[in-house]
């Protein structure tokens, strides 16, 4: 049975501010929900972790490349305009959200997620890895033999939710065909997508080193 899949997009907003907590998933969700109450009900939406430069204890300094990114079905993108030009209070840190660019998801054979969590698996990486392989095997419409996807588990990480902690690991996937790469990016693995978990992205493109000025 084939469902029509709305292509997902990443809505990427510029972000201006000084710093936010390094562990900001829950505070960011609270700040976004105040501006965008639909977020709580929108099971298919994901919130990317904000990237920046690790600074003082427990802080993330925002850089020119820091963005607020939500991953949503393309049909829902218009609903995110409520965030444009707003100020968010992320655990007492004020940041200014700009206007979004809509970025299509890019199929790549290699994907990584900063943090993935699966309920009931928080002790050992090996059973956790097996749980992720089962999720891939059960993913409807994946379109690839899940045995051919290699699942690598990285560092164990803990994030705070409202009044408890959530345990997970960094995860890398390799060997994905183009269609399955998009399916994994749309569905994610594990839970807590609103907290920034289970959101897979292509590995960062390595920026070329600045060339020395050319003189002719």
Image: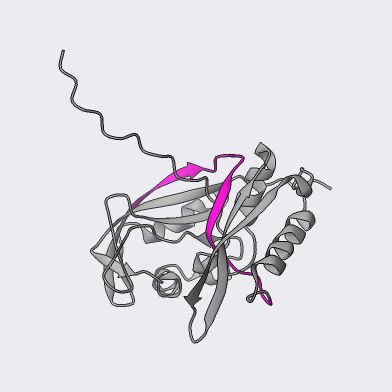
Which region of the structure is painted magenta? 99-120
Residue appearing at x 62%, y 40% in the figure: 109
Residue 8 in the image: above or below residue 119: above
Residue appearing at x 62%, y 50% in the figure: 173
Residue 92 in the image: above or below residue 76: below
- Asked whether, in this view, residue 121 is left or right of residue 72, the answer is right
Q: Quadrant of residue 178?
A: top right
Residue appearing at x 64%, y 60% in the figure: 189
- Asked whether, in this view, residue 191 is left or right of residue 138, the answer is left
Q: Quadrant of residue 167?
A: bottom right
Q: Which coloring applies here?
A: one colour
Which residue is nearer to you in this view: 146 or 191? 146
Q: Residue 126 placed where, x, y %?
A: 69, 66
Which residue is nearer to you in this view: 51 or 33? 51
Which residue is nearer to you in this view: 24 or 33? 24
Q: Residue 147 placed where, x, y %?
A: 78, 49
């Amino acid at each position: 049975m084939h469902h029509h899949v709305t292509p997902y997009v990443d809505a990427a907003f510029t972000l201006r501010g000084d710093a936010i907590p390094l562990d900001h998933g829950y505070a960011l969700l609270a700040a976004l929900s105040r501006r965008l109450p639909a977020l709580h009900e929108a099971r298919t939406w994901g919130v990317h972790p904000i990237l920046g430069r690790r600074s003082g204890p427990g802080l993330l300094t925002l850089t020119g490349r820091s963005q607020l990114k939500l991953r949503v079905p393309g049909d829902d993108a218009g609903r995110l305009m409520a965030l444009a030009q707003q100020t968010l209070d992320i655990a007492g840190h004020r940041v200014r959200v700009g206007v979004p660019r809509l970025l299509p998801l890019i199929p790549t054979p290699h994907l990584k997620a900063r943090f993935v969590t699966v309920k009931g698996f928080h002790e050992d990486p090996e059973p956790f890895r097996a749980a992720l392989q089962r999720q891939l095997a059960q993913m409807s419409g994946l379109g690839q033999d899940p045995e051919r996807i290699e699942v690598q588990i990285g560092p164990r990480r803990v994030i705070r939710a409202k009044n408890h902690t959530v345990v997970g690991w960094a995860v890398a996937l390799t060997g994905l065909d183009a269609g399955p790469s998009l399916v994994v990016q749309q569905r994610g693995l594990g839970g807590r997508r609103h907290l920034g978990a289970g959101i897979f992205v292509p590995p960062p493109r390595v920026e070329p080193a600045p060339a020395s000025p050319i003189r002719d």
